[in-house]
Amino acid sequence: MILKADYESRDESFKTKKSSEICFKCGICCVVRGYSCHVSYDSEKFNPRYTFVYDCLGSSDPARNPNIWLCVSCHKCEEVCPYEVSPIKFIEEMKSQAFEMGLAPSLIMSEVENILTTGYAFPISSVTLRLREELHLEPLQMKAIEDLRILSSKTGFIDKMLKAKENHI
């Protein structure tokens, strides 16, 4: 059975276009240990007959499929696919839709908010500062935070974040 996933994707200028990923269900993307998607062999949910990629591409409502958040965007599925399918493009678009609908996990929402407010993916604590000093590392600086705010504002990301927070379940 072939899986065909139609979706709206965005190009480099953020314009939407119709896209499709057609998977022949050969399984190469998820079953070659060490060269393929880690989710399929690190989870009891999936096996060679029902892989992580099949779960994402074949979902009836992929943006609401909580498994899309298991993808770490390593691109291994894309690299090993003999048919040049790019599940990662589809999964990233579904994550974007889920985020806008407020369906992203709380951890993701918090991390994005922290990046937008501090420029770092994790909170900087006094322990972090002390350890950096003990290791003779340069002090952390928030040099690019204003640039980050400008970029996220001009691309509409701040508005998406606010909308996502309103919709967050």
Image: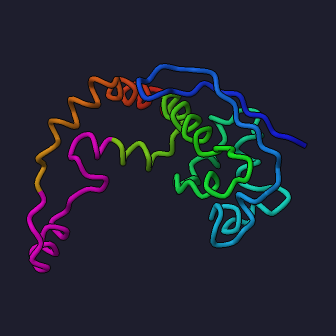
- Asked if 136 appears above or below 157 in the picture, the reply is below
Which quadrant holds residue 127? Answer: bottom left
Residue 125, quarter of picture: bottom left
Report the front residue among 25 and 106: 25
Task: Determine the residue positioned at 44% across, 24% down.
Answer: 14
Q: Is residue 53 magenta?
A: no
Q: Is residue 22 left or right of residue 141?
A: right
Is residue 169 visible in this depiction of the protein?
no
Q: Is residue 129 left or right of residue 45?
A: left
Q: Residue at 72% of width from left, 68% of height from top?
A: 32
Kindly identify the residue that appears in the image at 59 percent across and 54 percent down: 70
Q: Using the image as rendered, state which of residue 49 and residue 134 is in the foreground.
A: 49
The residue stretch that appears in magenta:
113-140
Q: Image height check: is 41 above or below 70?
A: below
In the image, residue 25 above or below residue 159: below
Q: How many marks?
A: 0
Q: Is residue 134 magenta?
A: yes
Residue 21 x/y as whole percent: 70, 36
- How are the residues colored? rainbow
**Where, quadrant-wise, is the N terminus in this rendering?**
top right
